[in-house]
Image (cartoon, rainbow, N blue to C red):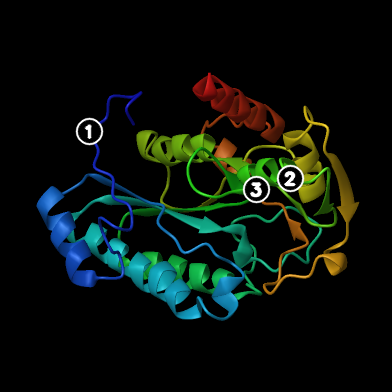
């Protein structure tokens, strides 16, 4: 936003509770934004199965409905972020936007319900499904691997889940791009190009370290929430808008180089 010299207002969860309908409506009425980028979400996938189930629904469904309804009320364009977890991961081909959804965990079901809330609001909206997100802010797989590498000479990472990593910068640029080019409203898939496994992703993250990264199966690394085995979404529709998509390795290296510069 700053690079493009756009006027913007940003809120974190302590500044605006999107589960409060009154707060969201009042904030939108006061600011009257032209564009709303909705990236707020409850993303603790395993906790969403039990202790976080209620909060998962409140944020990802009710909160999204509040944002979408408020955007509709003031006539703002909405770009909302969703997830590859709306799919079950059982097909071998890349998922296109019109493929049948079938979420297999509580997080995915809530995000799908959030998508429906956006559609039902009647707002001029884009829904951007993404996957394996990493970036400067918040917890993500890159930071987890780097942190574990400081205390473990060997790491084991699952090698039977296939997907596409997404740099937050790529995602943010695409969200603005959709509005800039006046793309047709609807659902889009966006990640960085190329496919990989979590093991290969981890090995690339730690390639300049002495840490040994070993592959394991999902059965050897059980988690509460189901993870799709084949989580690769087609980028054809996104690319048809004229958006150029970096390969995930290029995106990761650019991100890591940026972190190094910040540390110097």
Mark 3 = which residue? Answer: 144
CB-based contact (under 8 Å), mark 1 and mark 2: no
Between 123 and 108, which is closer to the camera in this rendering?
Answer: 108
Mark 1 = which residue? Answer: 7
Residue 264 position, x and y percent, is: 53, 18
Q: Is 50 situated above or below 26?
A: below
Closer mark to the observer between disc 1 and disc 3 = 3
Report helix, strand or loop for mark 2: loop
Q: Which of the 4 image quadrants contains residue 44?
A: bottom right
Between 60 and 77, which is closer to the camera in this rendering?
Answer: 60
Rate crowding at label 2 as few (under 14), some (14 to 19) or many (20 or more) other CA atoms within 10 Å: few
Residue 228 position, x and y percent, is: 73, 64
Q: Residue at x 79, y 57 (%)?
A: 161
Can the viewer see residue 195 in this picture?
no
Earlier residue among tags 3 and 2: 3
Q: Residue at x 77, y 27 (%)?
A: 208
Mark 2 = which residue? Answer: 151
Disc 1 from disc 3: Cα separation: 33 Å
Relative to 250, 172 lies left or right: left
Report helix, strand or loop for mark 1: loop
Relative to 176, 259 lies left or right: right
Relative to 56, 205 lies left or right: right
Residue 198 position, x and y percent, is: 76, 49
Report helix, strand or loop for mark 3: helix
Q: Residue at x 28, y 67 (%)?
A: 66
Disc 1 from disc 2: Cα separation: 43 Å
Closer mark to the observer between disc 1 and disc 2 = 2
Earlier residue among tags 1 and 3: 1
Earlier residue among tags 1 and 2: 1
């Amino acid at each position: 936003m700053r690079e493009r010299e756009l006027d913007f207002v940003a809120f974190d969860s302590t500044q605006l509770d999107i589960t409060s309908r009154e707060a969201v409506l009042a904030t939108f009425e006061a600011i009257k934004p032209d564009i709303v980028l909705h990236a707020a979400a409850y993303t603790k996938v395993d906790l969403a199965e039990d202790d976080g189930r209620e909060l998962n629904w409140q944020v990802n469904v009710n909160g999204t409905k509040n944002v979408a309804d408020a955007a509709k009320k003031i006539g703002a364009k909405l770009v909302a972020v969703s997830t590859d977890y709306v799919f079950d991961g059982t097909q071998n081909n890349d998922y296109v936007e019109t493929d049948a959804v079938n979420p297999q965990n509580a997080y995915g079901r809530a995000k799908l319900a959030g998508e429906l809330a956006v559609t039902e609001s009647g707002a001029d909206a884009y829904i951007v499904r993404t996957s394996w997100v990493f970036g400067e802010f918040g917890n993500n797989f890159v930071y987890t691997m780097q942190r574990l590498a400081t205390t473990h000479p060997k790491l084991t990472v699952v090698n039977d889940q296939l997907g596409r990593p997404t740099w937050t910068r790529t995602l943010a640029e695409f969200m603005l791009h959709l509005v800039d080019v006046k793309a047709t409203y609807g659902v889009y898939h966006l990640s960085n190009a190329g496919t990989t496994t979590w093991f290969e992703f981890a090995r690339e993250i730690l390639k300049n370290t002495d840490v040994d990264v070993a592959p394991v199966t999902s059965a050897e690394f059980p988690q509460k929430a189901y993870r799709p085995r084949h989580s690769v979404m087609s980028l054809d529709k996104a690319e048809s808008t004229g958006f150029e998509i970096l390969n995930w390795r290029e995106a990761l290296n650019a991100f890591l180089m940026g972190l190094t510069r910040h540390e110097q």
